[in-house]
Image (spheres, helix red, strand yellow):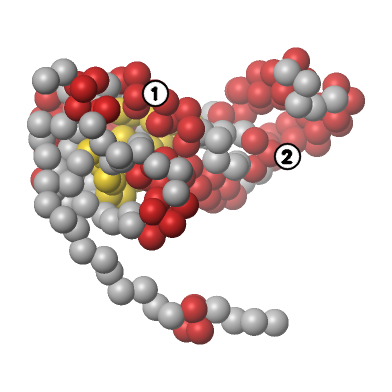
């Protein structure tokens, strides 16, 4: 059976409750299930509609879907080797510490496409470029981590809408992963791994603290 046929047999949905309320973190996947790169591209494009500070989109993805890539990832995945080896793919989410290089393209395309008036772009660039030139490394990291976390959650929900299961993972060798896959480790900073595929067995819900415990009203 081809990868394309495998992807088509899964239930896609735009039912919000089904996407959100039935999402589970899956540890063991059906290793026979493949996701075509065409569909993975679609998933990433939909996830990329997530918000980010002044639309800077600092997130970057490393999609590990080959047997060779998974074998390279496995020893770096600590307690998450099962997810790494059985899932259809593992998406390593990074942020680009030099994403300011794309600001002219981002704002320029917004003007070209009619999303933003030229004068608004000019005004914002005058404010944003000095801000990014002077922001501290820790503040920049905070902003980029928040933005990359937003897209990571959206990615998992988009995957669910496509009929796939996911699991976010923080247990891996963050200092080694970029370099292991030929990426500039100073520029591309790790955020999390997200495994994606089809659960090999039914997953279970988990307890959530009640709203009255986690919420303060003012």
- Up-down relation of residue 51 to residue 24 (above or below): above
- Up-down relation of residue 196 to residue 2 (above or below): below
Q: Is residue 40 left or right of residue 65?
A: right
Q: Residue at x 34, y 24 (%)?
A: 39
User: Pointer 1: residues within 10 angstroms few (<14), some, or many (20+)?
Assistant: few
Q: Position of residue 149 (x, y in %)?
A: 46, 48
Q: Is residue 146 left or right of residue 88?
A: right
Q: Position of residue 180 (x, y in %)?
A: 23, 28
The answer to which quarter of the image holds residue 126 is: top right
Q: Position of residue 200 (x, y in %)?
A: 12, 46
User: Pointer 2: residues within 10 angstroms few (<14), some, or many (20+)?
Assistant: few
The answer to which quarter of the image holds residue 12 is: top left
Taking the view exactly as shown, the residue that stands out farthest to the right is 119
- Up-down relation of residue 188 to residue 147 (above or below): above
User: Judging from the image, what secondary structure is the residue with disc 2 in?
Assistant: helix
User: Judging from the image, what secondary structure is the residue with disc 1 in?
Assistant: helix
Upstream in the sequence, badge 1 or badge 2?
Answer: 1
Report the number of numbered marks: 2
> Residue at label 2?
131
Task: In the rendered structure, find residue 41 and report the number of the disc placed on it.
Answer: 1
Taking the view exactly as shown, the residue that stands out farthest to the top is 112
Q: Residue at x 64, y 82 (%)?
A: 217
Q: Residue at x 31, y 50 (%)?
A: 168
In the rendered image, the quadrant that contains the C terminus is bottom right
Q: Is residue 210 left or right of residue 33?
A: right
Q: Position of residue 15 (x, y in %)?
A: 44, 49
- Up-down relation of residue 70 to residue 158 (above or below): above
Q: Residue at x 85, y 30 (%)?
A: 120
Task: In the rendered structure, find residue 178 and report the number of the disc placed on it.
Answer: none
């Amino acid at each position: 059976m081809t990868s394309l046929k495998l992807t088509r047999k899964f239930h896609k949905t735009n039912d919000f409750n089904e996407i959100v309320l039935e999402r589970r973190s899956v540890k063991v996947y059906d290793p026979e299930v493949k996701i075509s790169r065409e569909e993975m591209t679609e998933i990433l494009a939909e996830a990329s509609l997530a918000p980010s500070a002044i639309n800077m989109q600092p997130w970057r993805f490393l999609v590990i879907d080959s047997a060779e890539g998974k074998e390279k990832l496995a020893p770096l995945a600590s307690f998450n080797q099962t997810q790494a080896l059985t899932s259809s793919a593992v998406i390593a989410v990074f942020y680009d510490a030099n994403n300011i290089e794309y600001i002219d393209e981002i704002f320029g395309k917004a003007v070209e496409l009619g999303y933003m008036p030229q004068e608004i772009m000019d005004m914002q660039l005058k404010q944003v470029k000095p801000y990014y030139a002077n922001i501290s490394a820790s503040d920049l990291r905070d902003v980029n981590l928040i933005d990359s976390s937003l897209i990571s959650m959206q990615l998992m929900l988009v995957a669910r809408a496509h009929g796939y299961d996911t699991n976010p993972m923080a247990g891996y060798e963050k200092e080694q992963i970029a370099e292991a896959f030929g990426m500039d480790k100073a520029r591309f900073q790790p955020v999390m791994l997200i495994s994606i595929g089809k659960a090999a067995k039914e997953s279970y819900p988990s307890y959530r603290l009640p709203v009255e415990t986690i919420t303060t009203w003012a």
